[in-house]
Image (cartoon, grey):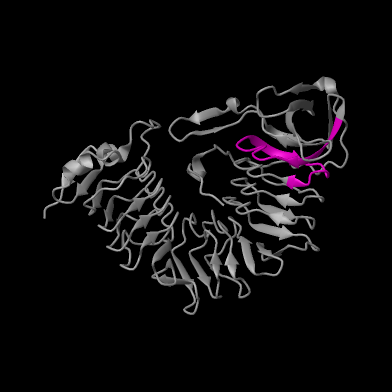
């Protein structure tokens, strides 16, 4: 899966509702007359219908015969509630929504077979009635909604990536018909206490509310609202899915006792209180040092736990890469020093490290990829020992200031310390010249 470029927790204002009414799946729905439909024109949908007090939007599925799927309305209807954070919502779905099993448009009757990508994303949807005809739920379909409970239809076959991201679900049951669940489907569901799977599902199972592959070789999703400060991965597991633990703030210690061979964009980041990781000494691919996760030969730093104590950290001299998202949202880290040998700081490596004030980049560094230090708003000192400055992405040190995209805090406030005799070179390199305070270090 992918790392979002906006902070997950601030994209949408999701007000917790003390009680939501959930409507059970609709088995049969009345046909919608053509007279009640309207074409979407150049908008995001093919046609719309009025049904049970709501306007619903649909796209015709061109890969199937007489089928359509629910989609979103006009994205121009976004209501921004906070200009600094970008919080807001789309107005086209709110409250309790019924989805019919069939609709008629231009003389053709279509079966509603799916809920499309982002169909209800960032709306004020609180409950939904899903017809039994629905076979798939698209990516981000219910993301960032105050949806607190849902019953999935018995014919459902697939669930898209981060489909329920930030929904306020407390429990969900996967029907026996589901054959595919994409990565991060329940990411950041901080109220979700359990993921259950119906008996008879051939591809998935649930143990103690945790979602696994049927053969228990892959841990796919650990509920965000599951309590307990410690967790040990089952002995049968040899892979942890990307973002599997994202959003759980109860875990403090995660132990991988098995010989896990694949940590697919491992989802231990964004667990606010996770302090340490431990892998077995004989693990062939990974190792941990003082609770920090590395590849086996420690040339790649994979994950620094979000809640790890301590204000400063020096990466081992063996480290050549700081991997994508390795220090995601680390809340305690004040200072990071990288030693000679390091060459690459990957995308999102230090994203949202709000407490980070001091960074030391070694002379061997060759690349800082996009968003490397994105939204590290309090950086005051950046020391770089590279004598021949390399070009980096203009957003590598981007930090927003009250919503003004042209006022980069780090370019304005941080001091860039460069090797003796190189100030003029940095001042004449496209990106580095954006820093207003460049100071040469002494010999």
Q: Which residues are magenta?
A: 109-136
In the image, is 438 to the left or to the right of 310?
A: left
Residue 7 place in picture, x, y as percent: 48, 43
Residue 258 found in image quarter? bottom right
Furthest residue to the top? 35
Tell me, yes or no, whether the highlighted magenta stretch contains residue 1.
Answer: no
Find residue 439 and report its image quarter. top left
Q: Position of residue 113 (x, y in %)?
A: 79, 41
Q: How many marks?
A: 0
Left or right of residue 50: residue 303: left
Quarter holding the C terminus is bottom left
* Residue at the limit of the structure toward the bottom, as seen here: 282
122 inside magenta stretch? yes
> 247 and 380: which one is in front?
380
Q: Left or right of 161: which side holds 328?
A: left
Residue 77 lies, in percent from the top left, at 60, 25
Q: Residue at x 56, y 50 (%)?
A: 188
Extreme residue toward the left, this view: 443
Residue at screen point 46% across, 68% down = 277
Q: Is residue 56 above or below residue 332?
A: above
Residue 284, position as x, y percentages in the image: 50, 75
Seen at 68% across and 42% down, the residue is 19
Name the one closer to the observer, 331 or 263.
263
């Amino acid at each position: 899966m992918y790392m979002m470029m906006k902070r997950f927790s601030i994209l949408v204002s999701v007000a917790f509702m003390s009680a939501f009414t959930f409507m059970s799946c609709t088995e049969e729905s009345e046909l919608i007359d053509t007279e009640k439909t309207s074409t979407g024109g150049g908008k995001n949908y093919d046609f719309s219908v009025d049904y049970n007090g709501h306007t619903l939007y649909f796209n015709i599925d061109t890969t199937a015969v007489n089928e359509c799927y629910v989609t979103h309305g006009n994205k121009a209807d976004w209501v921004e509630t906070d200009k600094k954070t970008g919080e807001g919502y789309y107005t086209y779905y709110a409250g309790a929504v019924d989805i019919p099993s069939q609709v008629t448009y231009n003389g053709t009757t279509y079966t509603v077979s799916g809920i499309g990508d982002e169909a209800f994303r960032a709306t004020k949807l609180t409950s939904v009635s899903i017809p039994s005809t629905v076979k798939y739920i698209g990516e981000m379909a219910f993301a960032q909604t105050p949806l607190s409970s849902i019953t999935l239809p018995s014919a459902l076959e697939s669930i898209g990536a981060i489909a329920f991201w930030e929904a306020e679900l407390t429990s969900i049951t996967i029907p026996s018909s589901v054959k595919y669940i994409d990565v991060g489907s329940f990411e950041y569901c901080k109220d979700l206490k359990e993921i259950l799977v119906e008996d008879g599902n051939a591809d998935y199972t649930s143990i103690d509310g945790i979602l696994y592959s049927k053969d228990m070789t892959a841990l796919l999703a650990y509920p965000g609202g599951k309590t307990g400060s410690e967790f040990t991965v089952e002995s049968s597991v040899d892979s942890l899915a990307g973002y599997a633990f994202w959003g759980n703030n109860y875990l403090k210690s995660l132990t991988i006792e098995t010989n896990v061979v694949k940590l697919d964009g491992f989802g231990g980041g964004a667990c606010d209180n996770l302090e340490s990781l431990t892998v077995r000494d004989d693990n062939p691919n990974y190792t941990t040092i003082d609770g920090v996760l590395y590849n086996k030969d420690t040339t790649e730093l994979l994950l620094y736990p979000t809640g790890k104590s301590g204000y400063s950290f020096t990466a081992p001299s063996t480290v050549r890469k700081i991997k994508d998202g390795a220090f995601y949202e680390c809340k305690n880290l004040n200072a990071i020093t990288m030693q000679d040998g390091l060459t690459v700081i990957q995308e999102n490596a230090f994203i949202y490290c709000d407490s980070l004030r001091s960074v030391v980049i070694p002379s061997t560094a060759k690349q800082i990829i996009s968003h490397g230090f994105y939204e590290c708003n309090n950086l005051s000192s950046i020391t770089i020992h590279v004598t021949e400055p390399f070009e980096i992405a203009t957003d590598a040190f981007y930090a927003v200031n009250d919503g003004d995209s042209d006022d980069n805090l780090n370019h304005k406030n941080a001091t860039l310390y460069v090797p003796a005799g190189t100030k003029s070179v940095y001042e004449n390199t496209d990106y580095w010249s954006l820093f207003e305070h460049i100071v040469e270090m002494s010999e």
